[in-house]
Image (cartoon, coloured by chain):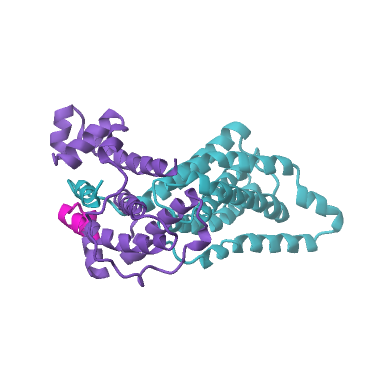
Chain colours: A purple, B cyan
Amino acid sequence: MTSEAELRAWMLASLKGDSAAHRALLTALSDRLRAYFRGKISRLGRSVTESEDLVQEALLAIHTRRHTYDPSQPLMPWVYAIARYKLIDHLRQTRASLADVPIDGADDVLAHDDHGDAESSHDIHKLLDQLPQKMRRAIEAVKLDGLTVAETAKRYGLSESDVKVSVHRGLKAITASIARERNS
Amino acid sequence: MKTEDLIAMLSTNVEQVDHRSLNRKIAAATVIGAVTAIGLVVFALGPRPDLMHAGALAVLLSKLLFAAIILIPATLLLARFARPANGRKTSIALLALPFLAITALGALSLSFSPSSHWSHLVLGDQWLECLLSIPIIAVVPFAIVIWAVRQMAPTDLRTAGALAGLVAGTLSAIGYALHCVDDSVAFVALWYGGTIALCTLGGAMLGPRLLRW
């Protein structure tokens, strides 16, 4: 398993805009998050899909809120604090007892040997369809088709900062609608 | 949706992120909140008429000093509790020290005064105005500070909300001090300290609802 030092180095590179480091980071974190959520949730008799929903929610939260990571601090406590927050929020909504969530860190939970091919109940295209057109187009172009911000701006006649803001807001809106979906 | 597809999407064209923006935003919200609170007091209530006299100015400065002693650590803690994994709660209790200190000073000042003066020293001329103004004016800086914290990722919403309320109440007290002509330490301890504590309580109650993400 990757070490804290390695994960932290990826995080620092990702904050500087390094896509490869970001991918490596999220991939490594998804394994840990999966182990964390499955460990907590299986004790409550919940499904694998449910824990994969939480993995994806936590990844989205880590992505859209990565500016709240303080580089002078270790990375994993920050990650697990987000995971735990999302778990408690989820259990509160689904009316499970909060007393069932152990407070201890997840370091004792071993990673399962399963990988990122697990599927959640979310459909990215359905989620995108719910967004306002500008956000949807910005995310499709920049995040799915891999166009640069400049190319996207040119294609839709927007400013570059407009595109960046639309992507950011769109991802936040997706995170929010996932939470709503799960609560309904 | 497969998790690896989500990761692929999030890792395409990753934007640079400034991790210092958090502290800057909290600081900016505090400054804007202070300016709004002062502006509201000056326009709605007007500054105290004797503001330019040395005696009144000295009292005003000591009220502002009291507020600053609360405000600075509260803002620093708010910036910490706006992040996940904020750590120990022990430092929170230290925020009560300025309140305890001024209460002790107020009690001390009463003990040196004849008891016939106590009611005026404690109630002043405008205790009701103070009791209402500080919480009402605090609504605006509270909204500004909450708006800033909502862009972060607090995981202890009750504490983060309480700190936002504390900051907002103190900013409001700074504004109100420009107007207030009640200068006894006992008055400041009870009505300033009490209303700021009330704002903190309000923030703690609203935090879980306003700060959820």
Residue A58 in view, yes or no = yes
Q: Nearer the viewer, residue B124 or B3?
A: B3
Residue B144 lies, in percent from the top left, at: 47, 41
Magenta-colored stretch includes residue B23: no
Residue A45 lies, in percent from the top left, at: 43, 59
Residue B52 in view, yes or no = no
To which quarter of the image does residue B186 belong?
Answer: bottom right
Q: Residue sitting at 32 percent across and 67 percent down?
A: A74
Q: Nearer the viewer, residue B146 or A75?
A: A75
In the image, taking residue B2 as reference, residue A88 lies left or right, namely right
Magenta-colored stretch includes residue A15: yes
Q: From the image, which quarter does the N terminus of chain A lie in?
A: bottom left
Q: Residue sitting at 52 percent across and 48 percent down?
A: B207
In the image, taking residue A54 as reference, residue B126 lies left or right, namely right
To which quarter of the image does residue A15 belong?
Answer: bottom left
Instruction: Spot the residue most to the right.
Output: B116
Q: From the image, which quarter does the C terminus of chain A lie in?
A: top left
Instruction: Spot the residue most to the bottom.
Output: A108
Residue A82 lies, in percent from the top left, at: 38, 57
Q: Nearer the viewer, residue B115 or B208?
A: B208
Count of numbered marks: 0
Secondary structure of the magenta portion, mostly? Answer: helix
The vertical placement of B121 against B33, above or below, is: below
Q: Residue sitting at 24 percent across and 59 percent down?
A: A11
User: What's the magenta region?
Assistant: A11-24
To which quarter of the image does residue A176 belong?
Answer: top left
Q: Nearer the viewer, residue B51 or B116?
A: B116
The vertical placement of A43 against A177, above or below, is: below
